């Protein structure tokens, strides 16, 4: 792709906004972080109920759509075959959509709910244990995946049914844009989509990189340092460059397949080496608690006690999923040629949910078991040394801990690389004027957006 293919009305404003918001954090981390914290508080406080209602609306709409007559609408001609096998397609959906965030939160999220539970429950009580093992399933379940799924449908319909070769978010909004996607409002939609995605991916990387660094330090008896973080960023960029060179079908597809096999292998190892019966029983209890309390959890605002729990967790999560949803919509649309509306909805809302639930059931309940049986004081480590150290302590409590630490380091690194590849691929598509369905953006263009994401992630890590 030549530089003339760049949509300058999208490319430069988006980079400028990212620079305006990240440079102050580097120059003054304390004040920059405080300013972002204030913005976050205002958004979650003012729009919290809107997020909660929107998520429920998305779930209800997708359930209706999947099982209506529209569920059989195929993205492509009647004889169009899917480009990817179902296992590879599901692996790409999961790897690109969840990324390293799952390896971070599945092991430690329960500890936050255990020590500061919702609904006025006493910390570290039996009620707190129930909520600790259940809320992760809620935040990473079908409600969240419904948000991911929703944008994919109009974008894929625009691509394969209406035959309009554009994956820009504005193109899927042409029905409500009076002057079309090329209007100033259309450009603004794409600019703020890019900014939102870079922020969302930056947050994911800001969590994933310290986890890898902590694991590598523990594995080799080193002290975690900024130098180690930088080395890992360089390795991550090299893996991304290799994947980007081979493209979507040979690069990202292979990364996703390899990582799913590794993640499944590690999950089986932890399930068998850890407290197997406790994991299965606790997960069964948690599903029951979730089904009994789904609507209570979905509409919880804590308007009287004002503990801050919904804003800090559920509303924050919904905002984060909303931020990444258009990116997933574009990426899923691009890899879902030959699929039907029903297939995409079921793949994301059921397949994605099962993948997340397996991770939270196995890794989360292993950590909970170690805490309750005083094998590893996970909650104390979380309070004194931070989340990364607490996560690593769980793996160190397993048999053959060195293998487990090496595996989680590699898996998280590949998750980050695949997410960097898929997100930069999406950003480069959106910031280009014309990219045909069978064409991929230029490698240098993808690298620009990959570096932008890494800069945001590093600024977040730098500011704590």
Image (cartoon, grey):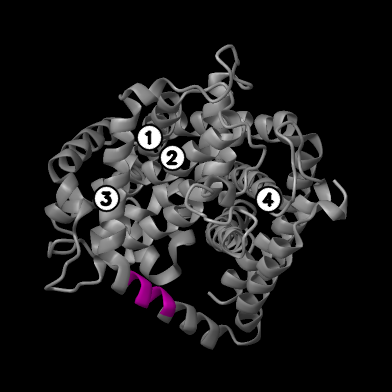
Query: Front-most of 126 and 168?
Result: 168
Residue corresponding to mark 2: 149
Q: In this orientation, does residue 369 appear? A: no
The x and y percentages for residue 153 are 47, 36
x then y, percent, for residue 377 = 33, 58
Residues rendered magenta in the picture: 39-44
Q: Nearer the viewer, mark 1 or mark 2?
A: 2
The residue located at (21%, 40%) in the rendering is: 286
Q: In 3D space, how far apart are the residues under numbered discs 3 and 2 (Cα atoms)?
A: 21 Å
Residue holding disc 4: 424
Q: Position of residue 413 (x, y in %)?
A: 63, 47
Residue designated by label 3:
135
Q: CA distance from mark 3 to mark 1?
A: 17 Å
Q: Earlier in the sequence, mark 1 or mark 2?
A: 2
Are circles 4 and 2 on residues that touch, CB within 8 Å?
no
Instruction: List x then y, in percent, for residue 257.
Output: 61, 28
Q: Which mark is residue 349?
A: 1
Task: Give the mark nearer the N terminus: 4 vs 2.
Answer: 2
Q: Determine whether the residue tagged by mark 2 lies in a helix, strand or loop.
A: helix
**Camera-nearest label, 4 or 3:** 4
Q: Are marks 1 and 2 in contact (CB under 8 Å)?
A: yes
- Assess disc 2: are there few (<14), some (14-19) or many (≥20) residues with their C-alpha within 10 Å of its C-alpha: many
* Contact (Cβ within 8 Å) of mark 3 with mark 2: no
Q: Nearer the viewer, mark 3 or mark 1?
A: 1
Q: Of marks 3 and 1, which one's residue comes earlier in the chain?
A: 3
Between marks 3 and 2 in the image, the one whose residue lies nearer the viewer: 2
């Amino acid at each position: 792709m030549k530089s003339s293919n760049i949509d300058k009305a999208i490319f430069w404003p988006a980079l400028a906004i990212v620079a305006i918001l990240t440079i102050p954090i580097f120059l003054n981390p304390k004040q920059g972080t405080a300013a972002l914290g204030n913005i976050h508080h205002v958004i979650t406080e003012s729009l919290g109920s809107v997020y909660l209602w929107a998520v429920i609306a998305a779930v209800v709409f997708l359930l209706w759509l999947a099982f209506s007559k529209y569920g059989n609408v195929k993205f492509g001609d009647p004889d169009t075959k899917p480009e990817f096998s179902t296992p590879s397609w599901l692996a790409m959906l999961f790897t690109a959509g969840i990324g390293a965030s799952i390896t971070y939160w599945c092991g430690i999220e329960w500890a936050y709910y255990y020590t500061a539970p919702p609904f006025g429950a006493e910390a570290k009580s039996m009620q707190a244990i129930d909520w600790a093992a259940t809320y992760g399933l809620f935040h990473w379940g079908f409600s969240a995946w419904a948000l991911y799924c929703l944008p994919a449908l109009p974008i894929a319909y625009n691509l394969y049914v209406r035959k309009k070769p554009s994956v820009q978010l504005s193109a899927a909004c042409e029905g409500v844009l009076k002057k079309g996607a090329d209007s100033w409002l259309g450009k603004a939609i794409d600019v703020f989509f890019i900014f939102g995605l870079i922020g969302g991916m930056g947050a994911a990387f800001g969590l994933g990189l310290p986890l890898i660094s902590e694991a590598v330090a523990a594995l080799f008896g080193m002290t975690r340092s900024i130098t180690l973080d930088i080395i890992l960023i360089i390795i991550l960029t090299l893996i991304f460059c290799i994947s980007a060179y081979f493209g979507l079908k040979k690069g990202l597809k292979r990364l996703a397949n390899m990582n799913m096999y590794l993640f499944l292998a590690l999950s089986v190892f932890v399930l068998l080496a850890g407290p197997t019966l406790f994991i299965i029983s606790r997960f069964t209890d948690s599903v029951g608690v979730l089904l009994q309390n789904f609507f209570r959890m979905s509409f919880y605002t804590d308007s009287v006690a004002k503990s801050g729990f919904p804003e800090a967790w559920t509303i924050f999560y919904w905002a984060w999923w909303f931020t990444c949803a258009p990116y997933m919509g574009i990426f899923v649309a691009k890899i879902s040629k030959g699929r039907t509306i029903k297939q995409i909805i079921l793949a994301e809302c059921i397949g994605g949910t099962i993948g997340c639930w397996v991770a939270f059931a196995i890794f989360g309940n292993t950590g909970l078991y170690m805490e309750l049986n005083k094998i590893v004081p996970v909650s104390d480590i979380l309070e004194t040394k931070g989340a990364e150290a607490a996560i690593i302590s769980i793996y160190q409590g397993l048999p053959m801990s060195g293998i487990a630490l090496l595996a989680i380091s590699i898996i998280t690194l590949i998750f980050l690389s695949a997410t960097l590849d898929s997100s930069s691929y999406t950003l480069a598509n959106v910031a280009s004027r014309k990219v045909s369905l069978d064409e991929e953006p230029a490698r240098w263009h993808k690298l620009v957006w990959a570096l932008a994401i890494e800069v945001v992630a590093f600024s977040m890590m730098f500011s704590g």
